[in-house]
Image (tube, rainbow, N blue to C red):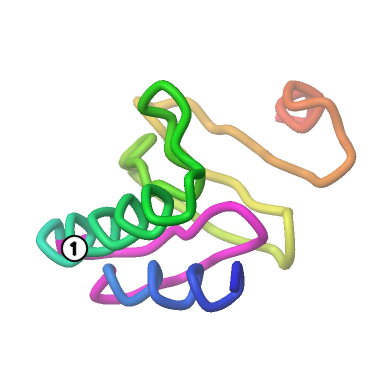
């Protein structure tokens, strides 16, 4: 089910460019499609009793809009946000990748 959800979430972008086990990144977000996705997730969770104090597992949220993004494979990517470069590498402390530049 999770993979299916990620694939459906990827269709909310004009051009999906990266996804892993818990996120999707892409270009050209279709907000209407994202709202429809979230509405379906809420309905399923309510039906199955998974809501807790308005917390909804699987709900898609927009965290940041990057200036630039490049991925190097699963769980390895770099992005530029507000003129700062960030590097994410699986298994490494979040700030360790930023020590190399």
**Position of residue 47 measured from the top left corner of the image (x, y, whole percent):** 39, 55
- Above or below 23: residue 11: below
Task: Write down the residue under mark 1.
Answer: 36
60 relative to 97 in the view: left or right: left
Image quadrant where one finds the C terminus: top right
Question: 27 or 40, which is in the foreground?
Answer: 40
Q: Quadrant of residue 41?
A: bottom left
21 relative to 70 in the view: left or right: right
Most frequent secondary structure within the magenta stretch: strand
- State which region is magenta: 13-30
Instruction: Report the residue at 48% width, 59% height from top.
Output: 24
- Above or below 46: residue 63: above
Image quadrant where one finds the N terminus: bottom right
**Position of residue 54 measured from the top left corner of the image (x, y, whole percent):** 36, 27
Question: Which type of secondary structure does the marked residue at label 1 adopt?
Answer: helix
Instruction: Report the residue at 74% width, 64% height from top.
Output: 74
**Position of residue 14 measured from the top left corner of the image (x, y, whole percent):** 24, 75
Extreme right residue here? 91
Question: 1 or 68, which is in the foreground?
Answer: 1
64 relative to 31 in the view: left or right: right
Q: In which quarter of the image is residue 39?
A: bottom left
């Amino acid at each position: 089910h999770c993979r299916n959800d990620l694939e459906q979430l990827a269709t909310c972008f004009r051009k999906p460019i990266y996804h892993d086990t818990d996120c999707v990144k892409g270009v050209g977000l279709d907000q209407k499609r994202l709202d429809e996705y979230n509405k379906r997730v809420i309905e399923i969770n309510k039906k199955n009793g998974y809501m807790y104090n308005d917390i909804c597992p699987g709900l898609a949220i927009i965290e940041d809009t990057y200036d630039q993004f490049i991925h190097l494979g699963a769980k390895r990517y770099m992005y530029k946000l507000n003129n700062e470069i960030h590097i994410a590498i699986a298994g490494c402390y979040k700030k360790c990748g930023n020590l190399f530049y």
